[in-house]
Image (tube, helix red, strand yellow):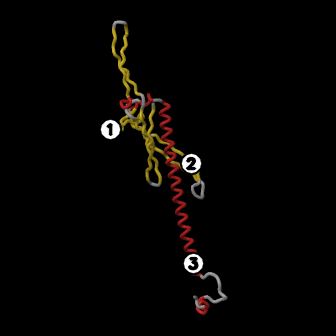
Amino acid sequence: MLDKTLYGKLRPQGKRGFGIAEVLIAAAVLGFLYMAVMNLQSGNRDALLRIRGRDGATEVAQQIIDTLSARGIAELSDDKLVSCGAGCLTLAKTGGAGALEPDTIKVIREWDGQPGILPNKMKVEYKAVVTVSSDADYLSSNQTQYSENATETSEKTVAHVYAKRLDVKVNWDFKNSTQSITISGVIR
């Protein structure tokens, strides 16, 4: 039990409220809490921007696959592609002196957003490289017998490329690092 005479000496009856030390300690605690909330908000903003950038890259890759699919498999024959390594073919563009060279597709996306207090525009430049399977990977050949006249029968081989596999790798920069995704598709 607390001695009333000791309590009376520590806190006189006429004085009530907070002391300066208590107020300073409360202000320091609130300051630390405010900084923690601001740091959390900054982390959430970065996560939102990273997710939005990845979603944009997925959209770009899917649009490239859809565009190449609409153009048809004939546009992706081996003679229209250029080698990018061991067993790897990529889209080609005509470079200097008419030679074919690897093509990188560049796409810029912009979003209006408000991740934070002030509204702003997010602008991301995506770079996509498309690798395509070889004609030999999806080649079907059939031998048929036919006759040009009634006395002579010969065999004829018919070859047909029935599909192509695409790998679309999309890169973009985020906070001084390069992010990337790869999406695969098949064109028939």
Label 2 element class: strand
Instruction: Kindly give the residue lying farthest to the bottom in the view shown.
Output: 5
The residue most toward the right is 14
> Mark 1, mark 2: which one is toward the viewer?
1
Q: Are marks 1 and 3 in contact (CB under 8 Å)?
A: no
- What residue did someone put label 1 on? 86
Q: Of the numbered discs in the image, which one, if any, rests on residue 24?
A: 3
Foreground pick, 147 / 21: 147
Residue at image location 47% in from the left, 52% down from the top: 174
Residue closer to the observer: 69 or 154: 154
Q: Look at mark 2 in the image and give the residue it sits on.
A: 111
Residues at badges 1 and 2 in contact (C-beta under 8 Å)?
Answer: no
- The local crowd at label 3, few if under 14, some if 14 to 19, many if 20 or more residues have their Cα within 10 Å, is few
Whichever of labels 3 and 2 marks the residue nearer the N terminus, that label is 3
Under mark 1, the amino acid is Ala
Q: Position of residue 25 (x, y in %)?
A: 56, 77
Question: Mark 3: which amino acid?
Answer: Leu
